[in-house]
Image: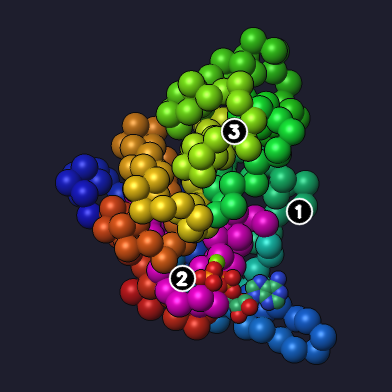
């Protein structure tokens, strides 16, 4: 745990309790989560580690409201995520969650700024307000200097910084990053980890990552291991 977070009162932003999730395909049930529990405090950087198939991505997807749990409870900043309707889930995601994916998920025909602006589309903002929010996000993600470029004109690390800017544009309390350094070399991956670390201290975001990257585990406040659908430590 960093000295900074050790000195701060640790209010839980995320509380996952005893969550199960199975996927059914052609009569085969895959039990992805078997009673997983996890907490993350406000302003904490948590790294989920564990073998492939342990359930890390599934757990992030449930916390982010991309999938629904079969049983158990998930509270994020006082909201019980498991009981939300589809419309409420969409609002919950937009207002609370910034998602960062291994493969960036940037739209290739749009510039960095246009990609970052996309999550603002449903909001009743003026053009000037949109631009101001985007500028703040690309500056926080250290990618403002490439705002007018297409994703294909950027390095992998720059593309990931652009996707982090897109995740930040709605000022989320919680950033969920699934293997954010999985497609990057060690040096570029380190820059992305440093950026996530900076967002925790500068913006007081809570970050939960799933990662096979040892550096991620070293930089996190806490490392949480998953084995076979359960959180073990
Ligand atoms: N949509 C799906 N349909 C069927 N099975 C799935 C689905 N998503 C995940 N699973 C299964 O659930 C289990 C947990 O998968 P999950 O993706 O959460 O693992 P992970 O820890 O993220 O692995 P990795 O490190 O490889 O990303 C695996 O056995 C996987 O095959
Ligand atoms: Mg995964």
Marks 1/3 in contact by CB < 8 Å: the verdict is: no
Residue 123's spot in the image, x, y percent?
Answer: 72, 26
Disc 2: which residue: 37
Highlighted magenta segment, given as a residue range? 39-66
- How many neighbours does mark 1 have within 10 angstroms: few (below 14), some (14-19), or many (20 or more)? few
Question: Foreground: 153 or 102?
Answer: 153
Neighbor class of circle 3 (other Cα within 10 Å; few <14, some 14-19, many 20+) is: few
The image quadrant where one finds the N terminus is: bottom left
The residue shown at (45%, 77%) is 51
Q: Which residue, given by chain and number where applicable, does mark 1 sit on?
A: 85
Q: Position of residue 215 (x, y in %)?
A: 31, 57
The answer to which of marks 2 and 3 sits earlier in the sequence is 2
Q: Which residue is drawn at 32% across and 63% down?
A: 214
Q: Does the numbered disc 1 mark a residue whose Cβ is under 8 Å from ligand 1?
A: no
Where is ligand 2, by quadrant? bottom right
Q: What element carries label 2?
A: strand
Q: Give how far across and how far down residue 145 sits, in percent.
A: 48, 21
Residue that carries the numbered disc 3 in the rendered image: 153
Q: Is residue 186 left or right of residue 9?
A: right
Task: Give the CA separation, mark 2 to mark 1.
Answer: 23 Å
State which quarter of the image contains the C terminus: bottom left
Query: Is residue 126 in sight in this rendering?
Result: yes
Camera-nearest residue between 44 and 213? 213
Question: Which residue lies most toward the top here?
Answer: 128
Q: Is label 1 in a helix, a strand or a loop?
A: loop
How far apart are the alpha carbons under marks 1 and 3? 39 Å
Horizontally, residue 41 falls left or right of residue 102, namely left
- Horizontal arrangement in the rendering, residue 181 relative to residue 75 (left or right): left
Q: Nearer the viewer, residue 125 or 107?
A: 107
Residue 56: x, y in percent?
A: 51, 68
Residue 94, picture quadrant: top right
What is the CA distance from the residue labelled 2 to the residue labelled 3?
Answer: 41 Å
């Amino acid at each position: 745990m960093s000295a900074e977070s050790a000195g701060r009162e640790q209010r839980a932003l995320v509380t996952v309790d005893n969550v199960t999730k199975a996927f059914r395909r052609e009569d085969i049930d895959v039990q992805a989560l078997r009673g997983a529990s996890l907490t993350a405090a406000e302003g904490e950087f948590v790294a989920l580690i564990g073998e492939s198939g342990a359930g890390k991505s599934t757990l992030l997807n449930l916390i982010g409201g991309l999938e629904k749990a079969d049983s158990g409870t998930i509270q994020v900043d006082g909201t019980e995520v498991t009981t939300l309707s589809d419309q409420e889930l969409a609002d919950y995601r937009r207002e609370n969650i910034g998602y960062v994916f291994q493969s960036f998920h940037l739209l290739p025909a749009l510039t960095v700024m246009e990609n970052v602006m996309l999550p603002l589309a449903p909001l009743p903002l003026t053009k000037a307000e949109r631009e101001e929010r985007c500028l703040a996000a690309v500056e926080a993600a250290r990618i403002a200097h490439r705002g007018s470029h297409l994703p294909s004109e950027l390095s992998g690390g720059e593309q990931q910084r652009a996707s982090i800017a897109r995740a930040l544009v709605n000022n989320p309390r919680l950033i969920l990053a699934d293997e954010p350094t999985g497609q990057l070399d060690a040096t570029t991956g380190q820059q992305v980890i440093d950026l996530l670390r900076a967002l925790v201290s500068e913006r007081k975001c809570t970050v939960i990552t799933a990662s096979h990257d040892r550096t991620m585990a070293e930089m996190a406040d806490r490392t949480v291991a998953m084995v076979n659908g359960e959180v073990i430590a």
